[in-house]
Image: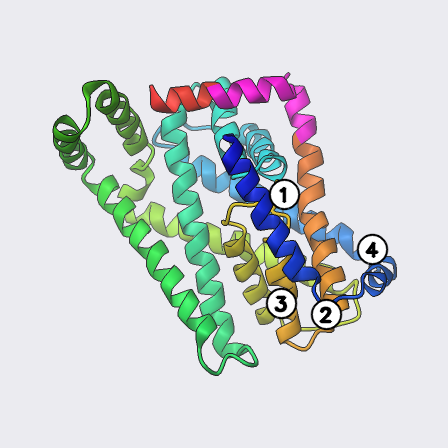
């Protein structure tokens, strides 16, 4: 992790935290946190891990053209990766789980990263679909000028364009590689072009799951199930607090906060998760201090269980923090070389 990337993430998180806390009474936020009914955390954590299991199955399905790995065997790898996302900035856990996958299954990091990128694109499309579905059913008060809808439309276009590019790369890998090689031979020095082309070849092999229409439908359907389960977790935790919004409003909140967490931030998505969540709930009439208490508890409930379990799996795999740092460096070198 380059120093400027770390401090950029910290700066963005500080700005979002400042925006989230404006006008709030921290005493009242804490009072709402203390008075929450935490029994609701148990079903919320259970349904979240069902979603993680579904994520693991989806990743295994996408990895099948490279190697068949059972969901049971892949689950610790996924959990370690999500733990990495929670404690390292810039979603470094994605690189970490690709590294652990190579250790366990000898799958090239470049190829598995391709499947991770495709996962993120599908997740983004589903999040935007949630927003599009939720907006007509629970229109945002005060969005008469359509600014929210315009932002969603622009983001949708970006994710859709990325998906089209991946489909083209998956459908015509040899042609795409030859085109890239033609440009690389003419525009880049050989010592730079060759490693990039080697990475591209491995990356293209990771896109093989997109060559089947049935596989694309399966990946998209699983993504919808995953994010519906996560919204159910939002609903369970809402029962612990003294407010109610519709399930579609929580779908909208889920979509917005997860799109916001794609921004660089401090480890654990500090601020980028919280501020959008609080603002969405306030738009639907939830008092700001209650909205902040709910969002903070939700954030911790999403962060802590999988981070603890990921730490356990990491220790079981014999990985230390120093080993993780070495893994990151080695993984970057493998991607480049």
- Provide residue 174's location: percent of width, then percent of height: 16, 33
Q: First in sequence, mark 3 or 1: give its number.
A: 1
Taking depth in this image into account, of 217 and 11 the one nearest to the observer is 11
Q: Residue at x 29, y 49 (%)?
A: 213
| Distance in Å between CA atoms under marks 4 and 2 | 20 Å
Mark in front: 1 vs 4: 1
Q: First in sequence, mark 4 or 3: give its number.
A: 4
Q: Which residue is mark 4?
A: 38
| Distance in Å between CA atoms under marks 4 and 3 | 23 Å
Quadrant placement of the C terminus: top left
Q: First in sequence, mark 1 or 4: give its number.
A: 4
**Circle 4 SS class:** helix
Q: Which mark is residue 268?
A: 1
Task: Decide: few, some or many residues near mark 2? Use Cα within 10 Å; few <14, some 14-19, many ≥20.
Answer: many
**Circle 1 SS class:** loop
Q: Which residues are magenta?
A: 311-329
Q: Which residue is mark 2?
A: 288
Q: Which residue is mark 3?
A: 279
* Tag 4–tag 2 contact (CB < 8 Å): no
Q: First in sequence, mark 4 or 2: give its number.
A: 4
Taking depth in this image into account, of 261 and 177 the one nearest to the observer is 261
Taking depth in this image into account, of 61 and 97 the one nearest to the observer is 97
């Amino acid at each position: 992790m380059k120093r400027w990337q770390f401090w950029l993430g910290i700066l963005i998180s500080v700005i979002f935290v400042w925006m989230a806390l404006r006008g709030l009474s921290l005493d009242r936020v804490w009072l709402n946190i203390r008075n929450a009914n935490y029994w609701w955390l148990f079903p919320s954590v259970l349904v979240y891990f069902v979603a993680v299991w579904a994520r693991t199955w989806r990743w295994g399905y996408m990895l099948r053209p490279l190697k068949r790995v059972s969901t049971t065997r892949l689950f610790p790898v996924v959990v370690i990766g999500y733990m990495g996302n929670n404690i390292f900035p810039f979603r470094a856990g994605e690189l970490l789980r690709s590294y652990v996958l190579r250790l366990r299954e000898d799958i090239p990091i470049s190829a598995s990263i391709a499947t991770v990128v495709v996962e993120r694109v599908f997740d983004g499309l589903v999040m935007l679909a949630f927003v599009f579905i939720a907006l007509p059913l629970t229109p945002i008060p005060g969005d008469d000028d359509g600014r929210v809808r315009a932002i969603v439309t622009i983001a949708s276009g970006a994710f859709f364009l990325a998906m089209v590019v991946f489909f083209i790369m998956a459908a015509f890998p040899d042609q795409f590689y030859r085109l890239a090689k033609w440009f690389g031979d003419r525009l880049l020095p050989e010592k730079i072009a060759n490693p990039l082309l080697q990475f591209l070849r491995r990356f293209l092999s990771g896109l093989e799951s997109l060559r089947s229409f049935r596989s694309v439908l399966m990946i998209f359907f699983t993504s919808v199930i995953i994010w519906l389960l996560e919204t159910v977790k939002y609903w369970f935790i809402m029962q612990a607090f003294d407010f109610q919004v519709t399930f579609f409003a929580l779908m909208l909140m889920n979509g917005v906060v997860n799109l916001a967490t794609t921004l660089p931030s401090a480890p654990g998505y500090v601020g980028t998760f919280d501020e959008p969540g609080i603002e969405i709930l306030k738009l639907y009439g939830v008092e700001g201090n209650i909205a902040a208490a709910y969002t903070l508890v939700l954030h911790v409930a999403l962060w802590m269980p999988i981070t603890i379990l990921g730490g356990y799996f990491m220790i079981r795999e014999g990985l230390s923090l120093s080993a993780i740092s070495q893994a990151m460096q080695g993984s970057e070198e493998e991607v480049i070389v």
